[in-house]
Image: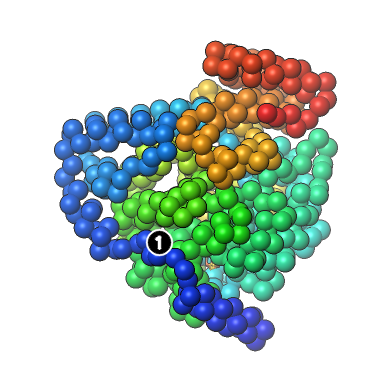
Amino acid sequence: MLTAGEKAWREKRLKEILKWEENSPYEDFIDPAKIWEILERKKNPDRQEILDIMAKARDNASSWAMLAPEEVAALANLKDPDLWEEIFETAFWIKNKVYGNRIVLFSPLYISSLCVNNCVYCGFRESNEFVEKKRLSLEQLDEEIRVLTEMGQKRLIVVYGEHPESDVAFMCQTIERIYSQKFGNGEIRRVNVNAPPLFKEEYEEIKKVGIGTYQVFQETYHPDTYRRLHPKGTLKGPFRWRLFALHRAQEAGIDDVALGVLFGLYDWRYELLGLLYHAQALEKEFGVGPHTISYPRLEPAVNTPFSVHSRFRVSDEDFKKLVAIIRLMCPYTGSILTAREPAPLRQELIRKGGVSQMDAGSQIAVGGYATLKRENIPDKQQFIIQDTRSIEEFIFDLCKEGYLPSFCTACYREGRTGENFMPLAKHATVKHFCIANGILTFQEYLLDYASPQLREIGEKEIIPRYLSWLEENLAPAAKRVRELLAKQKEGRRDCHL
Ligand code: SAM
Ligand code: SF4
């Protein structure tokens, strides 16, 4: 039950939100009838059409272009298993062309689960009394950061519910606190944010504390479904307020913004087109598309029947397809696969889906890292996660398959964000930075945090392999990386290009 104070805060804010919606300057870009018409028209794509789309997606990997809605619809409707294998190969090829064969690691950090909303699928919804809701004190936050830093993590996504106690002032205070901490040789160097939509002036405050990416998942691009799952009278109810959340962030100067759909709320094929129209709308308005796309899949949550019974739950087979299509659709965008998914599927999707960023060693209960438990704590979590590997185990599995684990945070700290970052990604040259900085940050991890076994495979196989790749492709960068690797061995840290 909300207190009178919480209710008053919600009502006041809702009024301001509805006023914004009334005066919103932006043109709608989601037309459900049109999306369904395209999906229907492209119901039975022929083989040649699919081959042409794959060829175009490969070309797009070194240009500015995304696929067209009709092309995405054709891929989403394809059934032929042989052609699907080719699409998976194409997804992997594109990912390597743009970013190289590295996986960027991050960890989620839930700072507050207090929430005045009532999203039907979420364990943290206000009316769910079976899940404990809490907010970290600054001292508890320090403890979480200590554990995360000592795990070797450098990059976080911090998560907040929507509540007067986790308003923009609290968000700024906690983000500043995170950046101020140092433990041993390590510190958190990039804080991305997953939080409710804000007003432009609030985003300006957030920008000042130096965040990386701002993520707002639309959850579903189907307005009727959206309204059913996000009750009227709550702050998440107004569809257009959320749809243009990242437009307002861009206006406020936050130029790395991130899209996402919660797959399982509505038809996955429809949602893919929703994501595409959203990416196009951002490109059109600001010349900068989404920095990343996430595709969380609905997971069970305590006392949340919808999370297990939704009729749109996505099978593993369809999930693999949608991840690969996102890679073909928007080649320059980072693609985030979370620990909601089981470990074997995650390993498979690196190869088949062209994934570029993954979380590792994740704990999603508020205060969960400090308890040092590996398992889920369901009555403290928003949902259950499937991949409970430690960061060390996760990295070991990446190395066994020849990938380069990366803790790189260089681009945004060197000003390669938004319109400065996009040309590098769009012309597939960012990978020279990705590989160089991946090698350096991986060595830093090996020196400070790895077990002897991991250090062996990292130093003997992975680093030499990627150094020779760099040597062949960009010899001056390889020379510089060798110099910095030597300096790191002498004790220097945070070396990057
Ligand atoms: N409260 C903020 C908001 O709603 O924008 C932060 C988001 S929430 C803490 C992070 C994301 O988790 C949501 O945007 C949603 O996509 C996802 N999520 C919620 N319930 C989920 C469930 N049962 N399974 C998987 N993901 C879920
Ligand atoms: Fe609150 Fe976000 Fe959960 Fe909705 S999804 S109930 S807004 S924490």
Residue for point 62% across, 25% down: 436
Quadrant including the N terminus: bottom right
**Would you identify the image quadrant in which residue 306 lies?**
bottom left
Using residue 39 as the reference point, say whether residue 175 is left or right of it: right
Residue for point 68% across, 45% down: 190
Using residue 444 as the reference point, say whether residue 351 is left or right of it: left
Residue for point 16% across, 38% down: 46
Quadrant including the C terminus: top right
Mark 1, Cα crowd under 10 Å, few <14 / some 14-19 / many 20+, is: many
Q: Is residue 27 visible?
A: yes
Q: Secondary structure at mark 1?
A: loop
Amino acid type, residue under disc 1 in the picture: Thr
Q: Which residue is mark 1?
A: 220
Q: What is the count of numbered marks?
A: 1
Q: Position of residue 180 (x, y in %)?
A: 81, 49
Q: Position of residue 491 (x, y in %)?
A: 83, 25
Vertical comparison of 280 with 403: above or below: below
